[in-house]
Amino acid sequence: MKTVRDIRTLREVLQGFRHDGDSVALVPTMGNLHKGHMGLVRLAGEYAERIVTSVFVNPTQFGPNEDFENYPRTFDTDRRRLSRAGVDIMFAPAHEEMYPFGLKNRTSVSVPGLPAILCGEQRPGHFDGVTSVVNRLFNAVAPDVAVFGQKDYQQLIIIRRMVADLHMPIRILASPTFREKTGLALSSRNRYLTDDERERAAELYAAICDCRDRYLAGERDIAALEREGLARLARAGFEPEYLAVRQQGDLSLPDRDSCLLVVLAAARLGETRLIDNVLFEVNVAGERL
């Protein structure tokens, strides 16, 4: 595996791969890799001959008082894991490489509408930072496919919208959420949880699954389902931000003909912000398909 720090070298190596007729997959990450990230890499390997994994803690997607300075940076461990997983290039640029004119003078890419709801309402500017850095990575790598985790579902939908709107010839793949035995979704931020909080954290997944199951059982008062899910999280010691039932395709509110739905939630447990979601499918009668 090659470790590359600059875009010029990255493109030179990729040109050699493409000269050989190999397709390229990109797995964007912020490092501190866990089993979920390795699942993204495995999925990338099913769709392309060559895999590029970026490791870049992007400052523009962190808001004031968020954990940019303390975000775990485990470069050497990440490099070993990626090498064992068969990654061809670990792209680990400095901030100056990604933002050559500085953070204040950077060009931003913004998708309208979607970034203002759910997580975006709680973290203004976050998704503009995501789309801006992902656009840079897409321009640097020009991948045939790119792989993102389903756990960050709103991010996935926003990136798909950006790719479609800008006519990027990139296939966006979603990897299923990887979980601990308790149901807690794997996340780099789980390391912030205390032992007691980790035990309680699985209640987030339990709450969204309960909301899903009640919808499938015929309950259609979405506002009531959301209120009861938020109350359940509060009783478990969370500070809930939202729990919402939405359509999978565009995160709009469901109507009576909606078939592909998702329950999304975000809540704080102690100092840690957790997000999760569960996808499900119904027919017009409300029965599980």
Image (cartoon, helix red, strand yellow):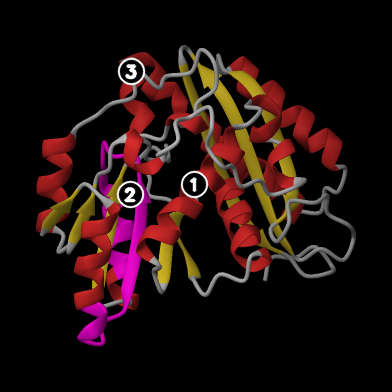
Image side of residue 155 versus residue 283, left or right:
left
**Does the magenta segment cover residue 7?**
no
| Pair 3/2: label in front | 3
| Pair 3/1: label in front | 3
The residue type indicated by label 1 comes to: Lys
x, y (%) of residue 166? 64, 65
Q: Quadrant of the N terminus?
A: bottom left
Badge 2 element:
helix
Residue displayed at 72% across by 46% down: 114
Residue displayed at 26% across by 48% down: 35
The residue type indicated by label 2 comes to: Gly
**Does the magenta segment cover residue 40?**
yes
How far separated are the C-alphas under marks 2 and 1?
10 Å
The residue type indicated by label 3 comes to: Asn
Magenta span covers which residues? 17-44
Return the disc, 2 or 1, that comes first in the chain's sequence: 2
* Residue beneath disc 2: 36
* Residue beneath disc 1: 151
Q: Nearer the viewer, residue 234 or 273?
A: 273
Q: Quadrant of residue 285?
A: bottom right
x, y (%) of residue 92? 24, 44
Residue displayed at 42% across by 38% down: 99
Return the disc, 3 or 1, that comes first in the chain's sequence: 3
How far separated are the C-alphas under marks 3 and 1?
22 Å
x, y (%) of residue 205? 53, 38
Quick one: label 1, few (<14), some, or many (20+) residues within 10 Å? many
